[in-house]
Image (spheres, rainbow, N blue to C red):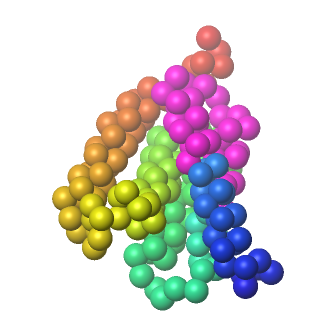
Amino acid sequence: MILGLSVSTFTLVHVIISLIGIGSGLIVLYGMLTSHKPGAWTGLFLATTVLTSATGFLFDSPFGPARVVGIISLVLLAIALLALYGRHLIGAWRPIYVVTALMALYLNCLVGVTQAFQKLDFLRPLAPTQSEPPFLVAQGVLLAIFVVIGLVALRGYHPERAATA
């Protein structure tokens, strides 16, 4: 039992929160690419991504890569929250927010891809040890996409300009 839920129910809740985080994060990313001011989607993305990382620590597992990713994600999210809500994206806080928020989204997606290769019957045989080319290609493509989109968002995200236009 975890927080009064069976492990399977808690896992389902954790996965749903994670998928909401990824989905809302993609909407936030689109908003960055189009210089929309942060709104409710941003709050949902940050909250569910924090919850995803935090609830991951409640699973009974040894310290390893998953926990390291969770720690890094929580640190990134703390900085993103400070940049957005504490410093209001003023000056250097705008690019700091873009980088940290997108890195947190990337890590959530990275875990999603990893879990897909571990749990989905049609992917598991392609990379049973997660060191095979299909897994490495999937991770590499994901990273490349986030680097390119992140650079575009970093250069183009100026919500203060959109607000005055």
Extreme right residue here? 4
**The quarter of the displayed image where residue 124 is located:** bottom left
Q: Which residue lies furthest to the left in this view?
A: 133
Reply above or below: 100 against 129.
above
Residue 12 visible in this rendered orientation of the protein: yes
| Percent coordinates x, y for residue 88 in the rendering | 65, 40
Q: Is residue 103 visible?
A: no
Image point 63% across, 70% down: which residue?
Answer: 11
User: Can you say which quadrant of the picture contains the C terminus?
Assistant: top right
Question: For residue 35: magenta?
Answer: yes
Q: As rendered, which of 37 and 21 lies closer to the eye? A: 21
Q: Does the magenta stretch include residue 77?
A: no
Nearer to me, 54 or 158? 54
From the image, give the main secondary structure of the stretch colored magenta: helix
Identify the magenta region. Answer: 22-51
- Say which quarter of the image contains residue 14: bottom right
Question: Position of 81 compared to 75: left or right?
Answer: right
* Relative horizontal placement of residue 22, taking residue 153 as reference (left or right): right
In this rendering, is residue 99 above or below 124? Answer: above
Residue name at image x 58 percent, y 43 percent? 23
Q: Quadrant of residue 79?
A: bottom right
Image quadrant occupied by the N terminus: bottom right
- The answer to which of 106 and 127 lies nearer the viewer is 127
Look at 37% across and 57% down and name the residue there: 122
Tell me: residue 3, above or below residue 138: below
Which residue does the image show at 50% across and 50% down from the upper left? 105
